[in-house]
């Protein structure tokens, strides 16, 4: 039986006394794209942060590539091949585009460098024209490209994108989704959060919708678009 990229069992999480996640179960197979949907405040970011080890008060089981990370620290999760593109991008504004990328570079587990600097710049051609620019000089869309490119430089086996296209112009939104398609084609497992639920579901093999810290709806991405429950859950 193949090892899953991610398995979450009965995950609960708290911020102080607030019980945010109430028993989440889901899996991501290797190479699979999973969409994570829900209105604001339903627990999406808390779920991601719990998986990554940023939420300290949590219960349940989390496995990445068969390894128990239920109580792992963020750097331990990252070392297993999990990369994170946070909401807000998190690039270094006082470093150049090249420096942001090179500082993150590391080979994959087999020592290969599929996503080296040249390869990443081939995907994000706009960044190749901005290599000497400081991170703070980039547009929002360029910063998002840089954040994704930096994550790819770590050779992840699981990539987590939180609010992949939030606040971007339509042309840049299309560019980001094009790249997400390339990431999927490369066989990288992906967990995607984005407000454009139609784009998420069209790209996802599976998807889940959160409601008050629980999974209220789950299934194949394209099938969920037809679900009468979806609009109610998302408030659209």
Image (spheres, grey):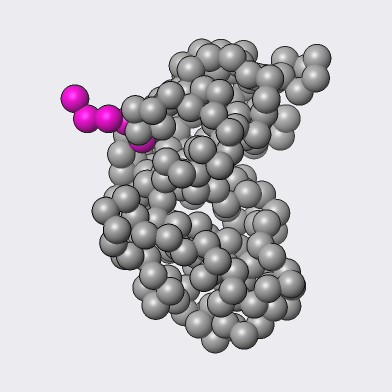
Q: Would you identify the image quadrant in which residue 97 lies?
A: bottom right
Q: Please state if 193 lies on the left or on the right of 218 as rendered.
A: right
Magenta stretch: residue 33 in it? no
**Residue drawn at x 80%, y 19% as measured from the top left:** 16
Which of the pair 172/92 is nearer the observer? 92
Please state the horizontal and vertical placement of residue 146, each as a whole percent of the image.
57, 67
| Res 57 visible | yes
Q: Is residue 155 above or below residue 226?
A: below
Q: Would you identify the image quadrant in which residue 142 lies?
A: bottom right
| Res 230 visible | no
**Residue drawn at x 50%, y 82% as measured from the top left:** 128
Q: Please state if 225 lies on the left or on the right of 230 as rendered.
A: left
Please state the horizontal and vertical placement of residue 98, each as a whole percent of the image.
56, 77
Which of the pair 93/177 is nearer the observer? 93
Q: Would you identify the image quadrant in which residue 73 lies?
A: top right
**Residue drawn at x 67%, y 25% as measured from the top left:** 56
Question: Magenta segment, which residues?
Answer: 1-6
Please state the horizontal and vertical placement of residue 214, each as a whole percent of the image.
58, 17
Q: Please state if 191 lies on the left or on the right of 130 as rendered.
A: left
Quarter of the picture holding the C terminus = top right
Quarter of the picture holding the N terminus = top left
Q: Is residue 21 above or below residue 220?
A: above
Please state the total of marks drawn on the protein image: 0
Q: Is residue 31 above or below residue 150?
A: above
Please state the horizontal and vertical placement of residue 3, each as a whole percent of the image.
27, 30
């Amino acid at each position: 039986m193949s090892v899953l990229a991610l398995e979450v069992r009965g995950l609960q999480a708290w911020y102080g006394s607030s019980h945010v996640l109430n028993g989440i179960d889901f899996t991501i197979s290797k190479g699979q794209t999973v969409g994570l949907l829900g209105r604001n405040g339903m627990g999406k970011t808390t779920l991601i942060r719990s998986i990554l080890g940023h939420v300290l008060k949590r219960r349940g089981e989390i496995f990445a590539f068969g390894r128990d990370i239920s109580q792992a620290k963020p750097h331990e999760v990252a070392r297993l091949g999990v990369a994170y593109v946070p909401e807000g991008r998190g690039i270094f504004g006082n470093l150049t585009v090249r420096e942001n990328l090179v500082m993150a570079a590391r080979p994959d587990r087999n020592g290969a460098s599929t996503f080296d600097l040249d390869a990443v710049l081939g995907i994000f051609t706009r960044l190749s024209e901005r290599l000497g620019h400081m991170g703070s000089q980039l547009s929002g869309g360029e910063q998002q490209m840089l954040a994704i490119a930096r994550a790819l430089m770590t050779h992840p086996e699981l990539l987590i994108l939180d609010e992949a296209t939030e606040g971007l112009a339509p042309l840049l939104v299309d560019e980001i989704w094009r790249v997400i398609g390339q990431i999927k084609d490369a066989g990288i497992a992906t967990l995607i959060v984005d407000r454009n639920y139609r784009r998420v579901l069209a790209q996802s093999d599976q998807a889940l919708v959160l409601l008050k810290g629980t999974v209220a709806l789950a299934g194949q991405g394209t099938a969920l678009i037809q679900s009468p429950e979806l609009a109610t859950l998302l408030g659209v």
